[in-house]
Amino acid sequence: MAATDPKPARELTLRGIILGAVLTVVFTAANVYLGLRIGLTFATSIPAAVISMAVLRLFPGATIQENNIVQTIASAAGTLSAIVFVLPGLVMVGWWSGFPYWQSVAVIAIGGILGVMYSVPLRRALVTGSDLPYPEGVAAAEVLKVGAGVGGVEENRKGLSAVITGSLLAVIFPALAKMKLVAEEASIILPVGAGGTSFSAGLSLALVGVGHLVGLAVGVGMLTGLVIGFGVILPVFTAGGPPAGTDLADFISTVFRSKVRFVGAGTIGIAAILTLLRVIGPVVRGIGSALATSRAREGGGFENIALTERDLPIGLVGAVVLALMIPIAVLLSGFVTGGPIAAAPALGIGSAVLYVLVAGVVIASVCGYMAGLMGASNSPISGVGILAALGISLLLAVLFGQGNGVADTKALVAFALFVTAVVFGVATISNDNLQDLKTGQLVGATPWKQQIALVLGVVFGAIVIPPILDLLNQTFGFAGALGAGKDALAAPQAALITAIAQGVLGGSLDWGLIGIGAAIGLAAVALDAALRAAKRGAMPPLAVGMGIYLPMQVTLLMIVGAFLGHFYKGWAARQSSPDFAERMGVLTVTGLIVGDGLFNIAYAAMVGATNNPDIFAVIHEGPWTMPLGLAVFAGVVAYAYMRMRASSVAGPGGDALQD
């Protein structure tokens, strides 16, 4: 240990690992269900940190670093549940009838562990050597600091009060919505000629909180994408009007899913490629720094390296990555029976393994950057899944052709989806764990211990996810799959990614939509460069792509939160203790995220246990619930920001602040 380092705090403990494993079951089950039902998952790191602090406080010697390990394990497993955006596709195309346990465990675990390994050098490039905001990582660190009593007594009292207030507000509104007293989404169809567009907002305080944290540049980028997608592209694509017998609202929704999102995927693709070019330098420097650390370790052991700079040895990382290519090849060999790849299995499997190896590096870099830019739960990970499916499908089309007949196309699609699942595991974990490592940096954690915790989280998640998928498949089924009933889960992201693979390998994909998105992406990149050169701010191209790709009910309130956060930060900067005032803002909106996450977990668990989504309903939803919901929601947001300012009226020591 370096001479200036303090004695290492209690960090990677058995009780922390056990608690992380228990939270994994709860969070992963909730996220799998929500991902299949509505196509979205929520970040679990902050709720895990809150629960961990409450539990470990009952035991002697608990530390902030130990609580950080618990949230790292739980958030890794919770994030890995996004694999449901791909794996159900194998059931939808009829290749699987269920989810073979060990095959499913293996593909989830291998992809996740690769994600951890690929992101080890990225920590130095994108966390310690970058000014990316990492909104959820910062928020999780603030929660941990308040719980551990970091700072003055009065400041921490106010900080804890801010988190609790935000959490209660975030629970009250969705509870009213689930009781059907207010609407949880406001939407309206706007006819434009024979077609139209939609205007909608999911009334979630967590979205406002995340918008506050990501900042104005990301908010403006998302607003730009939203205007392009819903203000221009959607009205143009629906201009011919709906087919006979089709409702305009259903028609608009279908066009958004089948066309506009593909345009957004093209924008994200271009932005992702150029993001990679932007981060190549930092990534290379990060790898070089990791190698230098490895040499220092060999020369004098860990004692020559600061506690907070001790990653897993880069040699071990490389060995694990290469070793994992062997089980990937073995798993893929089970997908070559009866299809075109059976005629040249070495070519097909070898190309797929090389694709995983190379695409993993690219996707880990891009997803890590996205997490730093806008947060793990708001990164367009399904867009990355689309690009991964597109890439392997194109590779297979070049090697084995398109339109080979129904049976051969089905085999190729299944092969492509399985490869995509591995790469998608890399994407989800690298997207999450850099956020966790940012939290670790802020609370003085040891990187290699966190990286071990991330691997444990992946393993726990891989063990839990397949039986949950099987249960939901047997209970509800998936829309579009053989034998699916009227209550089948939509699994929208899996359906979209499967449709792309089928479109490429069947020769029916509309490349024009991807091209339109790519052109928009190039324009966004040029505008971003011009703004940066003129020092007039920025327009993150990935945020523009996200604004086009994601439904408005997800993005609109994030944009509102970004503007509210900007105005609040401007007010905070004029106070006599601006850092304290800004911290109160961060802690209050963190509470909004905490409360929303915990409520959704409890709700999903109750729905899963009772199979009754209206378990809290006390009345039937009426036409008055939407306007009432908007009024109540606006009132709650206004109250949250008033309380935020009120908590900063006196500084941490009680001194008056000036307005």
Image: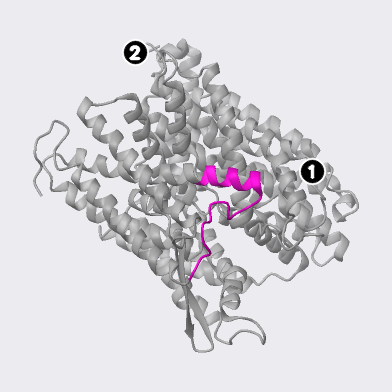
In the drawing, does residue 115 fall left or right of residue 566?
Answer: right
Q: Relative to 333, does residue 444 appear above or below in the rendering?
A: above
Q: Relative to 500, does residue 169 appear above or below in the rendering?
A: above
Q: Relative to 607, does residue 267 appear above or below in the rendering?
A: below
Give how far across and how far down residue 543 sits, in percent.
Answer: 43, 58
Give how far across and how far down residue 456 sits, in percent.
Answer: 60, 27
Q: Looking at the image, which residue sits at the far front?
A: 618
Q: Which residue is mark 1?
A: 332
Q: What amino acid type is highlighted by mark number 1?
A: Leu
User: Which element type, helix, strand or loop, lies under badge 2?
Assistant: loop
Q: Earlier in the sequence, mark 2 or mark 1?
A: 2
Magenta part of the protein: which range? 600-622
Q: CA distance from mark 2 to mark 1?
A: 48 Å
User: Which element type, helix, strand or loop, lies under badge 1?
Assistant: helix
Name the quadrant containing residue 478: bottom right
Q: Which residue is mark 2?
A: 6
Name the quadrant containing residue 133: top left
Give how far across and how far down residue 167 sits, in percent.
Answer: 38, 43
In the drawing, does residue 620 fall left or right of residue 226?
Answer: right
Residue at image point 50% right, 76% down: 233
Give how far across and how far down residue 492 sits, in percent.
Answer: 63, 60
Q: Quadrant of the N terminus?
A: top left
Q: What amino acid type is highlighted by mark number 2?
A: Pro
Towards the viewer: 77 or 217: 77
In the drawing, does residue 431 fall left or right of residue 108?
Answer: left
